[in-house]
Image (tube, grey):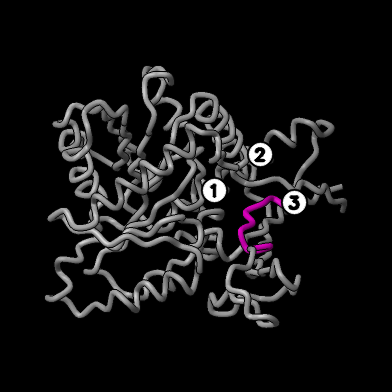
């Protein structure tokens, strides 16, 4: 539901970034990285993006979303693993309190510049 | 075609502002909690039970968020503690800027605990850091036991889960054990307190707050 404000934040930051580029620079694509713990509905984000860029200077901007799975690290044995079905205990040694190392991302990874 | 590596958080602005707020709260040794739940889970009711028991000398203030109306602030203001309503006008979450704005005329040395009642929503508020020490999630027994599995993010990020309306357990097909076990599946270390609008568990919850405040005052608890 807050995907529209997420889109606005992305475009605000791209606007700032564009000011730092040579005049006339056009961005053709933006790459976002969205973790499964970020609380973002990716379809909603895509739809919100289309709605917001329509009839603006950003209309030609493509959106690519990389979804990131939740991964955990065990503080005891250092095993790293995918937390399937939210089961976060270490599959190697059984330790219950493991640490989130991926899956919380909500980042602008890159923009592509039209030459 | 060339690429510019950006690698920035989407909510960079909110994050920056939240970090500034957190620094101010640290300086003034203020405990800040951010209460999140679905609409109707009992956030305001829990706070009513809390304030009516709270020693009037305690320096507690509240910010309460809703899309519309001052109703919650009116409900909560009858015990003499300072309460301010944040009307988001349709936005489904509170952000750091709203917190900063609504705290502006309360001197930071005039309170020890800030309780933020977020907009009723289990999803969006999860993404917005408000500079708090702890997120607290409320799950009521009239919802599903599988909420922690369906909406894991907020349960992962919450220090404490309040299981509310437990006085209704005899009347609803809800297994408290299953709900707690689901919460611990997504967040093994989550603390759990059971409460009801009749006052069950409220003392335990207030003790929790008291202990966290003591840890903030002693410098033992610093939020990252």
| Residue B25 in the image, given as x and y percentages of width and height | 50, 29
- For residue A23, which quarter of the picture? top right
- For residue B175, which quarter of the picture? bottom left
Residue at image point 23% right, 46% down: B44
| Residue B98 in the image, given as x and y percentages of width and height | 42, 32
The residue at which mark 1 appears reads as A6
User: Does residue B178 appear left or right of residue A35 in this picture?
Assistant: left
User: Does residue A86 appear left or right of residue B118 in this picture?
Assistant: right
The disc, 1 or 3, on the residue closer to the chain's N-terminal end is 1
Q: Are marks 2 and 1 in contact (CB under 8 Å)?
A: no
**Foreground: B15 or B110?**
B110
| Magenta stretch: includes residue A108 | yes
Check disc 3 and report its element: helix, strand or loop. Answer: strand
The disc, 2 or 1, on the residue closer to the chain's N-terminal end is 1
Residue range (magenta): A100-110
Query: Could you confirm whether marks 2 and 3 are on the same chain?
Result: yes
Q: Is residue B12 visible?
A: yes
- For residue B107, which quarter of the picture? top left
User: Does residue B23 appear left or right of residue B61 in this picture?
Assistant: right
The residue at which mark 3 appears reads as A28
The residue at which mark 2 appears reads as A13
Q: Quadrant of the N terminus of chain A?
A: bottom left
The disc, 2 or 3, on the residue closer to the chain's N-terminal end is 2
């Amino acid at each position: 539901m807050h995907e529209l404000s997420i889109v606005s934040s992305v475009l605000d930051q791209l606007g700032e970034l564009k000011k730092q580029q040579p005049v006339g620079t056009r961005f053709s694509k933006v790459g976002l990285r969205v973790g499964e713990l970020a609380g973002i509905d990716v379809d909603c984000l895509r739809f919100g993006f289309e709605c917001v860029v329509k009839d603006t200077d950003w209309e030609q901007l493509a959106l690519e979303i990389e979804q990131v799975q939740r991964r955990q690290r065990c503080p005891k044995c250092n095993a790293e693993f995918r937390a399937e079905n939210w089961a976060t205990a270490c599959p190697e040694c059984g330790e219950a309190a493991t640490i989130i190392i991926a899956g919380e991302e909500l980042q602008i990874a890159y923009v592509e510049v039209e030459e | 075609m060339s690429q510019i590596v950006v690698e920035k958080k989407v909510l960079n602005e909110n994050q920056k502002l939240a970090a500034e707020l957190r620094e101010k709260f640290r300086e003034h040794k203020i405990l800040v909690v951010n209460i999140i739940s679905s609409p109707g889970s009992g956030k305001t009711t829990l706070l009513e039970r809390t304030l009516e028991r709270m020693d009037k000398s305690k320096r507690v203030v509240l910010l309460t968020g809703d899309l519309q109306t001052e109703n919650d602030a009116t409900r909560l203001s009858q015990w003499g503690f300072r309460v301010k309503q944040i009307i988001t006008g349709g936005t489904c979450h509170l952000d750091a800027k709203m917190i900063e704005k609504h705290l502006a005329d309360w001197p930071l040395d005039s309170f020890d605990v800030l309780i933020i009642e977020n907009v009723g929503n289990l999803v969006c508020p999860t993404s917005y850091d408000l500079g708090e020490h702890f997120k607290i999630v409320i799950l009521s027994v009239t919802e599903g036991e599988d909420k922690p599995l369906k909406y894991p993010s907020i349960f992962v990020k919450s220090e404490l889960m309040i299981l509310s309306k437990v006085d209704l357990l005899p009347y609803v097909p809800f297994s408290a054990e299953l709900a707690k076990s689901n919460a611990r599946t997504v967040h093994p270390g989550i603390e759990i307190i059971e409460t009801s609008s009749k006052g069950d568990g409220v003392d335990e919850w207030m003790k929790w707050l008291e202990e966290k405040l003591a840890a903030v005052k002693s410098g033992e608890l610093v939020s990252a």
